[in-house]
Image (cartoon, rainbow, N blue to C red):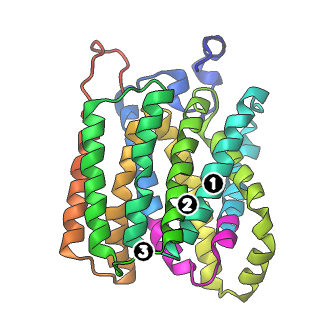
Amino acid sequence: MRSPGILRRQAPSEVPAGVPAGVRAEAPAGHAAYLPIAAAATTVLLWAAAFVAIRHVGTAFSPGALSLGRLVVGSLVLGAFMVLRRPAWPPRAMWPRLVVVGVLWFGVYNIALNAGEQRVDAGTAAMVVNVGPILLAVLAGAFLGEGFPRSLLLGSAVAFAGVVVIGLATSVDASADAAGVLLCVVAAVAYAVAVVAQKPLLTRLPALQVTWLAATIGAVSCLPFGPSLVREAAAAPPSMIAWVVFLGAFPTALAFTTWAYALSRTSAGRMGATTYLVPPIAVLLGWVLLGETPATLALGGGVLCLVGVFLTRRTPRRTPRGASGDE
């Protein structure tokens, strides 16, 4: 999906700072090699914090209103940076993918997940939603040419087992609302399809621009929930509104941008596997911030998640020394 002609015309000094380094060079050098890792870690931490925040804010905002509120904030925050950078407008051929990413991931995923978590407990939601990275690995192998590395499949299986353990340890009810489970499945599918659509965009567009456009498209798709947002925001205490602003500025604007940057530097399958770290970190944050003491079994599941993600990063390198080969 790369365009060699464009790459040849752009000197390093001409490429905006927000352009993923993968557009300039496949392999980072020196300390820059740690930037994708730092970006992925930022995403995982903020998305884990988002799960805790959503549980808190869900008492004041309905799923659609919450999704619209955080997307509007995220679009405005990213839009301010876009005004300063003024990148070129994406070619017409890229807009279908941008719409898919915006509607599915920023719109459908957020609404389905918020609604699903109101019908099933957090443990069940974690187990169902984390089918997403497995679907992503399959789709990326089939449609992005990433193949099916054994270490990725093994690591994903181990990490998913860890999520199941966490889910069993944190589930509060043996029964599960069928509609809630279905909503979580919808969220998982929307996430997987959207990331496969997003990956090729990042070879041509800056991560910041892709995230802003997708967030804006997602916000537009959620506009039918505008009246609910206005009504619920008027009744909500200032602290709840502050949490919505936090969700829009950090887990949405910042975390989705760092995700896009990291995704541009590695395979979609591997990047998706890193999200298995979200449930154990969310458990720890719930412990620290909400006083939700985790079960010992949940901590064991967290260790499995860590081992599984580590295994996904152990794909043998086949490239000569000095050549690019993160994938």
| Residue 309 visible (yes or no) | no
**Residue nearest the observer in this picture, 299 or 244:** 299
- Amino acid carrying label 2: it is Phe
Could you tell me if residue 271 is visible in this image? yes
Which SS class for mark 2?
A: helix
Q: Which residue is mark 2?
A: 250
Residue to which mark 3 is pinned: 176
What's the CA distance linking mark 2 and mark 3? 31 Å
Is 274 drawn above or below residue 87 in the view shown? below
Which labelled disc corresponds to residue 106? 1
Could you tell me how far apart the alpha carbons at marks 3 and 1 are, in whole angstroms? 26 Å
Q: Residue shown at 46%/39% (left/top)?
A: 262
Q: Nearer the viewer, mark 3 or mark 1?
A: 3
How far is mark 2 from mark 1, CA to CA? 14 Å
Three-letter code for the amino acid on which mark 3 is drawn: Ala
Q: Position of residue 59 (x, y in %)?
A: 57, 84
Q: Quadrant of the C terminus?
A: top left
The secondary structure that most of the magenta stretch takes on is helix
Badge 3 vs badge 1, beta-carbon distance below 8 Å: no
Magenta segment, which residues? 49-68
What is the crowding at mark 1: few (fewer than 14 residues within 10 Å), some, or many (at least 20)? many
Above or below: residue 266 compared with residue 299: above
Does the magenta portion include 52? yes
Q: Residue at x 68, y 50 (%)?
A: 103
